[in-house]
Image (tube, rainbow, N blue to C red):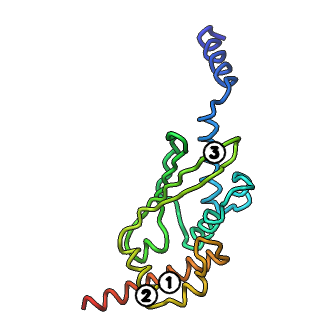
Amino acid sequence: MSSRYKWLMTALITIANLPISANDNALQIAERFITSFYSWDQNALNALLTEDGDHESIIYYQGWAEGGNYSIKTRRPCVMNKDAVSCSITVTDDFGLALGYIATDTFNLKISNGQVTEVTFTADDPPIFDKLVNWIMNERDHILTGPCLDMFAGGLTPKICAKTVAKSAEEFMRVEVLKQQ
């Protein structure tokens, strides 16, 4: 065994035994969070969340994303910010397919003692998605009192809600095309 090989092995073993910094640990937890979220594993996602936190909107969003057939197009590594970890994921979904866009979800995670204590999320959906929501409110309001009741605020049917909104997006686009003719 050459001395160079021995040196390399010693260096690798030394590095492997170094303690993980809090930031590295937070990044690993955030990456597991993203994996759990987009694999539709609610049990794994719940295991990463604090028991005393208000996490109903993220659990709802996971069901919504599954119902909307979110598929990861680009998964960027999570990055450490001042007091949170930020993870940006570009996805394709049924809404974007119907309305003609691709969106990026950005999750901001606060992590303490190895668990996610707070999650906020945003998406860069274009204005046409807002037009769809307004159209649903005005033309298909039964969706908001039916499958989308309490959407992102304790609603019980996120998958069905997402599928209904996606189907409405297709109908909305047909109406928009007819208006332009």
Q: Residues within 10 Å of mark 2 (few under 14, many from 20)?
A: some
Q: For the image shown, how many numbered marks are present on the structure?
A: 3
Q: Nearer the viewer, residue 21 or 73?
A: 21
Nearer mark to the viewer, of 1 and 3? 3
Query: What amino acid type is highlighted by mark number 3?
Result: Ile
Q: Which residue is mark 2?
A: 171
Q: Spatial distance from mark 3 to mark 2, Cα to Cα?
A: 41 Å
Which residue is rendered at x = 55% and y = 57% of the image?
Answer: 120
Query: What amino acid type is highlighted by mark number 1?
Result: Lys
* Mark 2 in CB contact with mark 1 (< 8 angstroms): yes
The image quadrant where one finds the C terminus is bottom left
Q: Spatial distance from mark 2 to mark 1, Cα to Cα?
A: 7 Å
Q: Which residue is mark 1?
A: 167
The relative height of residue 10 versus residue 36 in the rendered view (above or below) is above
Q: Spatial distance from mark 1 to mark 3, Cα to Cα?
A: 37 Å
Counting from the top left corner in percent of width and height, residue 61 is at 59, 66
Classify mark 1: helix, strand or loop. helix
Nearer mark to the viewer, of 3 and 2? 3
